Image (cartoon, helix red, strand yellow):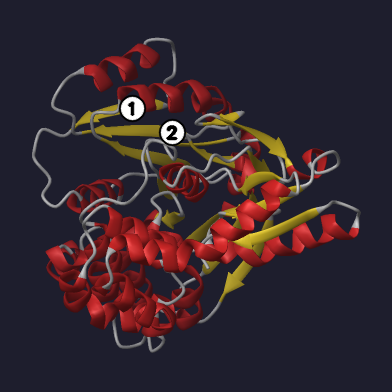
């Protein structure tokens, strides 16, 4: 087997680190995979957790304390990669401190690493295992740019990809305020362009293989999100080498949730989206989400109560009619977007009855006050109005699945929350 090292950067999340270690350490050791925790916390709680497990005989677990202040935080990712370049590992996998995976996923990865590619892109929200080679850099950009935004979605060949990186050049080009949160995206595509015919492979995994257990902590409607998701995302892709000629297409492949109707309404309600914000970022709105440009303008201009009445009227009418028909109100998808939809509806005085998923494995039993059910089983005995609350890229797949349930006799209607 290729020798894999997993690197977890963390800051003040001892409970999250404990959950990761409790879930993964045993099978990581069995499969001869090392795990290194890079901690920049101001206290010793995370170190205490890690060293407790180290004392239990897990010689594949390592700890390093960063005492310096990383500003921006993205510099920490680069520092870890630079350190790993001088080790003897074959592959480096940097991943979030709040994401866990199962042993089936690990064994699948280890088997694929035998292929010796320079970069493996991981799509963790697919319906089944699959492997696909990407031979063109522009295809790599368009198909993988937004996916690789998630820390943990890429495994790098240490010798061919990481080693030899000009980190000063990378820092000068991508460690800037206008690239905040996306400097690692800049690195992946910059370095791939520097290699001659890089071997790039996309691996897909069933959804139950990975779980982000912090996805329900809070909605993502925070003050700086618009700037990060528009200006920083756009600037990072425009900064890539000229060999990438499909940059705008790649920009538009990102998750559209953050500028969906309901996200814009929530931004407006929170007081962080108005005419001034629209004017400041209209270039990026037009470039990244041209189909929502006019809508974004009107939501920015009109009072919040009026925009909610205009843009939520159809949804509220459907919910009222469905309730009158005795239908349950179900949210399809147990991810962050489902939680945000639930939160948004609650603020309008609407309570969902439950969450639905295609497979309960890997999903929580409850989200907030609602239970999570397998869709096919639940719809055998319940009539429902379903609001689809998944990533934009998954809407078509969910719609097809719900259509198949209708054909099998389920009494349901559905609408996409982001439309």
**Left or right relative to 55: residue 67:** left
Disc 1 is placed on an element classified as strand
Say which of 346 and 255 sits in front.
346
Point out residue 357 in the picture as x, y percentages from the top left corner: 67, 44
Point out residue 389 in the picture as x, y percentages from the top left corner: 56, 54
Q: Can you identify the residue that label 2 sits on?
A: 34
Point out residue 388 in the picture as x, y percentages from the top left corner: 61, 56
**Left or right relative to 332: residue 101:** left
Q: How many marks?
A: 2
Q: Can you name the residue that lies furthest to the front here?
A: 324
**Left or right relative to 102: residue 270:** left
Instruction: For label 2, count other residues whose C-alpha is less than 10 Å away and answer few (under 14), some (14-19) or many (20+).
Output: many
- Marks 1/2: CA–CA distance: 8 Å
Question: Which quadrant of the view contains residue 255?
Answer: bottom left
Q: Locate the N terminus by quadrant.
A: top right
Say which of 159 and 317 sits in front.
317
Residue that appears at 48% across and 68% down: 144
Compared with 45, 364 (above or below) is: below
Disc 2 is placed on an element classified as strand
Residue that appears at 35% across and 87% down: 243
Labels 1 and 2 touching (C-beta < 8 A): yes
Point out residue 114 in the picture as x, y percentages from the top left corner: 60, 53
Q: Can you name the residue that lies furthest to the right here?
A: 408
Say which of 346 and 303 sits in front.
303
Residue that appears at 85% across and 51% down: 410
Which disc, if any, is residue 62?
1
Say which of 327 and 18 sits in front.
327
Q: Does any portion of residue 163 appear in the rendered image?
A: no
């Amino acid at each position: 087997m290729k020798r894999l090292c997993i690197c977890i950067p963390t800051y003040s999340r001892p409970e999250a680190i404990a959950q990761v270690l409790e879930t993964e350490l045993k099978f990581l050791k069995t499969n001869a995979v090392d795990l290194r925790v890079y901690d920049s916390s101001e206290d010793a709680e995370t170190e205490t957790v890690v060293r407790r497990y180290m004392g239990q005989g897990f010689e594949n677990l390592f700890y390093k304390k960063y005492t310096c202040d990383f500003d921006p935080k993205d510099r920490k990712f680069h520092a870890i990669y630079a350190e790993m370049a001088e080790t003897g590992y074959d592959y480096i996998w940097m991943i979030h401190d709040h994401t866990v995976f199962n042993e089936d996923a690990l064994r699948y990865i280890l088997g694929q690493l035998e292929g010796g590619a320079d970069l493996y892109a991981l799509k963790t929200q697919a319906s089944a295992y699959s492997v696909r080679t990407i031979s063109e850099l522009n295809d790599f950009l368009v198909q993988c740019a937004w996916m690789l935004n998630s820390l943990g979605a890429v495994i790098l060949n240490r010798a061919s990809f990481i080693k030899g990186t000009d980190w000063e050049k990378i820092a000068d080009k991508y460690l800037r305020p206008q690239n905040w949160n996306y400097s690692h995206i800049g690195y992946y595509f910059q370095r791939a362009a520097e290699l001659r015919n890089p071997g790039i492979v996309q691996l897909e995994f069933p959804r139950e293989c990975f779980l982000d257990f912090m996805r329900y902590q809070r909605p993502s409607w925070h003050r700086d999100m618009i700037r990060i998701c528009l200006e920083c995302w756009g600037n990072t892709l425009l900064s890539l080498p000229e060999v990438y000629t499909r940059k705008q297409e790649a920009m538009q492949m990102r998750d559209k949730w953050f500028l969906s109707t309901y996200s814009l309404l929530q931004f407006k309600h929170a007081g962080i989206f108005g005419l001034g914000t629209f004017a400041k970022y209209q270039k990026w709105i037009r470039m990244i989400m041209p189909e929502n440009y006019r809508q974004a303008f009107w939501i920015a201009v009109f009072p919040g109560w009026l925009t909610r009445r205009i843009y939520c009227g159809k949804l509220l009418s459907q919910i009222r009619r469905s309730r009158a028909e005795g239908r349950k109100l179900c949210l399809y998808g147990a991810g962050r977007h489902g939680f945000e939809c639930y939160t948004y509806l609650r603020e309008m005085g609407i309570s969902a009855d439950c969450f639905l998923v295609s497979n309960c494995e890997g999903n929580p039993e409850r989200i907030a006050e609602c239970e999570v059910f397998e869709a096919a089983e639940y719809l055998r005995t319940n009539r429902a109005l379903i609001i689809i609350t998944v990533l934009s890229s998954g809407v078509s797949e969910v719609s097809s699945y719900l259509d198949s349930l209708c054909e099998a006799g389920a009494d349901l209607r559905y609408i996409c929350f982001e439309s």
